[in-house]
């Protein structure tokens, strides 16, 4: 039996996708915090101490990825629903 997906729930799909990606980014976050604490500091021209590399940016990557992918997935669902109304949705075959 062939089934077509003609409508995707934007909020639910985006929420699941964003949370999944945020969880998958957690190991990178912990690694970056470790490197942030271990990295030697550099001195600027005015004598200020700054970290050698912006590891804290990567520490917050799960939050950035979660928010970014939520909105990008919402956009994808909206465009998919428009296209699926005109030409049909994804089609797959099932069997019992």
Image (cartoon, rainbow, N blue to C red):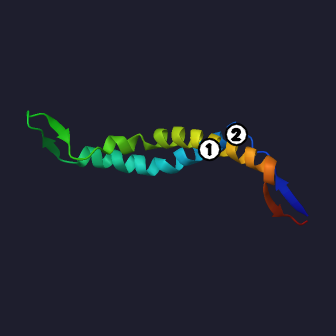
Quarter of the image holding residue 96?
Answer: bottom right
How far across and down, in percent of the image, does residue 93 sit?
84, 65
Q: Is 65 positioned to the left or the right of 51 in the image?
A: right
Residue at 34% across, 44% down? 33
Residue at 91% across, 64% down? 1
Q: Which residue is mark 1?
A: 73
Q: Who is closer to the viewer here, 43 or 93?
A: 93
Q: How many marks?
A: 2
Q: Who is closer to the viewer here, 83 or 57?
A: 83
How far across and down, in percent of the image, does residue 14 sit?
64, 41
Mark 2 neighbour class, 10 Å CA radius: few under 14, some 14 to 19, many 20 or more: some
Q: Who is closer to the viewer here, 10 or 25?
A: 10
Q: Which residue is mark 2?
A: 10
Query: Tag 1, which secondary structure?
Result: helix
How far across and down, in percent of the image, does residue 44 sit?
12, 38
Asked if disc 1 and disc 2 are in contact, CB closer than 8 Å, the reply is yes
Residue at 38% across, 45% down? 58
Quarter of the image holding residue 82?
Answer: top right
How far across and down, in percent of the image, does residue 26 sit?
47, 47
Q: Is 90 positioned to the left or the right of 41 in the image?
A: right
């Amino acid at each position: 039996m062939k089934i077509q997906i003609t409508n995707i729930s934007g909020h639910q799909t985006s929420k699941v996708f964003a949370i999944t990606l945020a969880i998958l980014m957690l190991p990178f976050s912990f690694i970056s915090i470790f490197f942030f604490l271990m990295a030697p500091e550099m001195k600027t021209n005015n004598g200020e101490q700054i970290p050698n590399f912006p590891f804290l940016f990567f520490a917050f990557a799960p939050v950035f990825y979660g928010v970014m992918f939520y909105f990008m997935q919402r956009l994808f669902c909206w465009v998919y629903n428009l296209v699926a109304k005109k030409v049909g949705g994804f089609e797959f075959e099932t069997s019992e």
